[in-house]
């Protein structure tokens, strides 16, 4: 077995051992948590990895264990897109995919492995885009990771290719030197033998002269062969040099044609590569000016020199989307460390990559849309208020004149429709204020145990309970006061109660509270129709309703903004809101938490 084969087999064994230990740990962890499906997956996967390790160590099989090891790494990387990985570093781990693929399978097999891995990432992104699965990372970060993996794959491909060629050349040269050494030794042996003959056979001058002439002829032939071999080696070196220059040109062209500005900086802070788009996005005329401008716009957010110095210890990426330039441009900047594996198998940071994207057009479009949304909502509310006021006055003061029942019904419909439209416009205005951070919170210290009964009395007065029970389960001990805006909390609780009553046909709604460590939790439990599992991920998103279909509006009406507004209001007051549980035809439980009133949050 060659040294290269031993090294590849050792690396494969390490991958299988790490994967086997990881799955063994998760087997016991999932058993403890009674996740039997995960336990079966962990058990089967772990057995396959340990069998593969046995085939590698005992039978010296490589091909199938290498595929099993690669698939286990791919499975872990794919699951990190959903879970986020350790400390949310799931995207950085994808940089290991091209390294492991090329080391395990070489250039051609590595390309196939990278293609399969990128197809897996792209497929999961599409499934997430259509709402079939939920990925931890947004689509743009995954796209940037795909670019990073492609760049690393390109570097690893040519590194593997050229290192293989270099190894072959070294082997050829070594073989040539060995042949020359053997030939030289043979010549020396012949010379010694001939000299011995000269010593012992002085009378055989003719034979000695002939032997010397033969040796000289052999030496000349050897010199000619050496000259030919030298010319051949020089030609190969020239060809390899041309290939390297061609590869460099392709890499330079790829970097120049990237749709974002590109910087590559080594660990000493020196610029290695800067493309033209980086100059354009930063308004610079030279590489040095572009680098200086980059440090200036990131001042106060991240220190590039410190980030480079600590890239071995702190491996996380950095993304910022709020960079604005004096000329009106808006930039999105992404920083990531570049790692390589040495013989010691320890990751070594070689520098960082910086991507600079001009998002000015996207920011302008988003702001224009929000401004139009806000202005249109304000303009709609004025005529709608007039319609509601006039119809209300007609119903209050001119009801006797509406003798025709159909005319009375028409006025009632206009009045109710105007009220509904005003509620929709108010939802739009609330969304606009929340998304533009213009919502004002009048934070106070108050008792939820007093606010909740007041809200329930309003439902008794308005008669909106549809003969359903509406119950507040008082706590055993007095609730501590919370720090929040009472009006906003009232709006959130009314929204949750309204939804519960809207989707409940029989039974009723219960409100209960829990005191946590530094928070108070409010739970709203109903006996309604429940929410299908596939639609639960749509909750708390804008314009989304948890109906039967993803593509039709719910028959109960509404804008799909209630839970979205509630989430933003609760989070704006330092709390959280979520769906605790839900089952079809059994009901749902929603909850939100608010911070306790303390001297610190009061200030």
Image (tube, grey):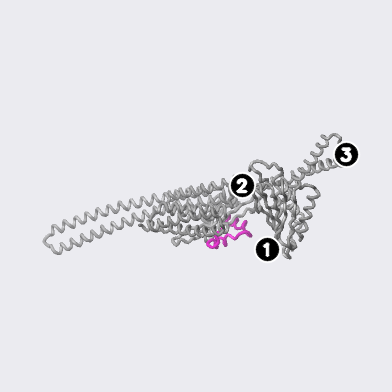
Does the magenta portion include 226? no
Label 3 vs 1, first from the N-terminus: 3
- Residue 464 in sight: yes
Residue in the picture at 12% in, 62% down: 201
Quarter holding the C terminus is bottom right
Residue 222's spot in the image, x, y percent? Answer: 26, 54
> Which structural element holds mark 1?
loop
Is 372 or 285 nearer to us in this picture? 372
What range is drawn magenta here? 289-316
Find numbered disc 2 in the image and state the secondary structure of the residue it sits on.
Answer: helix
- Residue 457 is marked as none
Q: Nearer the viewer, residue 52 or 355?
A: 52
Q: Secondary structure at mark 3?
A: loop
Find out whether residue 292 is within the magenta segment: yes
* 582 to the left or right of 210: right
- 68 vs 216, left or right, is right
Q: Residue at x 79, y 47 (%)?
A: 463
139 versus 27 height, above or below: above
> Residue at left 61%, top 59%?
302
| Residue 65 vertical placement versus 409 (above, below) | below
Task: Report the residue marked by disc 3.
Answer: 398
- Residue located beneath label 2 in the image: 534
Q: CA distance from mark 3 to mark 1?
A: 58 Å
Q: To which residue does mark 1 refer?
A: 517
Which numbered disc flags the more N-terminal residue, 2 or 3?
Answer: 3
Instruction: Bin the neighbour count of mark 3 within 10 Å (Cα to Cα): few under 14, some 14-19, many 20 and up.
Output: few
Task: Answer yes or no: is residue 433 visible.
Answer: no
**In the rendered view of the protein, which quadrant contains the N terminus?**
bottom left
Q: Mark 2 to mark 1: distance in Å?
A: 33 Å
Quadrant hosting residue 398: top right
Q: Residues within 10 Å of mark 1 (few under 14, many from 20)?
A: few
């Amino acid at each position: 077995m060659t040294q290269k084969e031993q090294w590849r087999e050792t690396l494969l064994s390490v991958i299988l051992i790490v994967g086997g230990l990881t799955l063994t740990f998760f087997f016991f962890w999932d058993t403890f948590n009674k996740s039997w499906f995960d336990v079966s997956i962990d058990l089967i996967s772990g057995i396959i990895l340990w069998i593969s390790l046995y085939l590698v160590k005992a039978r010296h099989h490589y091909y199938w264990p290498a595929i099993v090891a690669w698939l286990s790494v791919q499975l872990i990387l794919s699951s990190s897109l959903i879970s986020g990985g350790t400390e949310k570093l799931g995207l950085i781990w994808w940089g290991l995919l091209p390294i492991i693929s090329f080391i395990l399978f070489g250039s051609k097999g590595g390309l196939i492995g990278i293609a399969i891995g990128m197809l897996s990432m792209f497929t999961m992104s599409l499934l997430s885009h259509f709402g079939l699965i939920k990925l931890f990372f947004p689509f743009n970060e995954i796209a940037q990771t795909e670019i990073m993996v492609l760049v690393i794959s390109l570097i690893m491909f040519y590194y593997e290719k050229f290192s293989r060629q270099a190894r072959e050349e070294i082997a050829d040269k070594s073989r040539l030197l060995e042949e020359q050494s053997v030939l030289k030794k043979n010549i020396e042996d012949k010379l010694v033998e001939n000299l011995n003959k000269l010593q012992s056979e002085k009378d055989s001058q003719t034979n000695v002269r002939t032997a010397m002439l033969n040796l000289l002829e052999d030496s000349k032939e050897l010199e000619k062969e050496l000259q030919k071999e030298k010319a051949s080696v020089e030609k190969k070196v020239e060809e390899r040099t041309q290939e390297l220059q061609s590869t460099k040109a392709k890499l330079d062209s790829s970097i120049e044609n990237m749709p974002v500005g590109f910087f590559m900086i080594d660990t000493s802070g020196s610029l290695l590569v800067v493309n033209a788009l980086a100059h354009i996005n930063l308004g610079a005329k030279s590489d040095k000016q572009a680098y200086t401008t980059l440090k200036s716009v990131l001042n106060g957010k991240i220190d590039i020199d410190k980030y480079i110095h600590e890239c071995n210890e702190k491996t996380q990426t950095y993304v910022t989307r709020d960079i604005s330039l004096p000329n009106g441009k808006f930039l999105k900047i992404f920083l990531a460390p570049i790692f390589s594996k040495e013989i010691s198998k320890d990751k070594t940071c070689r520098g960082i990559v910086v991507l600079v994207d001009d998002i000015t057009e996207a920011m302008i479009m988003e702001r224009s849309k929000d401004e139009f949304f806000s202005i249109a909502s304000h303009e709609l509310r004025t005529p709608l208020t007039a319609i509601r006021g006039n119809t209300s006055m007609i119903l209050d003061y001119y009801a006797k004149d509406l003798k025709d029942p159909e005319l009375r019904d028409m006025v009632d419909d206009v009045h109710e429709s105007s009220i509904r439209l005003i509620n929709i416009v108010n939802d739009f205005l609330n969304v606009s204020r929340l998304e533009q951070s213009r919502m004002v919170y009048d934070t106070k210290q108050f008792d939820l145990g007093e606010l909740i009964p007041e809200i329930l009395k309003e439902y008794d007065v308005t008669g909106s309970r549809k003969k359903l029970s509406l119950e507040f389960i008082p706590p055993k001990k007095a609730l501590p006061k919370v720090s929040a805006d009472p009006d906003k909390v009232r709006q959130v609780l009314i929204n949750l109660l309204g939804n519960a009553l809207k989707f409940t046909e029989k039974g009723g709604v219960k409100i209960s509270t829990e005191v946590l460590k530094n928070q108070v939790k409010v739970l709203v439990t109903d006996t309604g129709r429940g929410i299908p599992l596939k639609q639960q991920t749509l909750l708390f998103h804008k314009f989304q309703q948890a109906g039967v279909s993803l593509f039709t509006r719910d028959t109960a009406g509404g804008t799909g903004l209630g839970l979205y507004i509630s989430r933003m209001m609760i989070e704006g007051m330092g709390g959280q809101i979520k769906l605790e549980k839900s089952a079809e035809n059994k009901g749902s439980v929603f909850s939100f938490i608010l911070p306790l009133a303390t001297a610190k949050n009061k200030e």
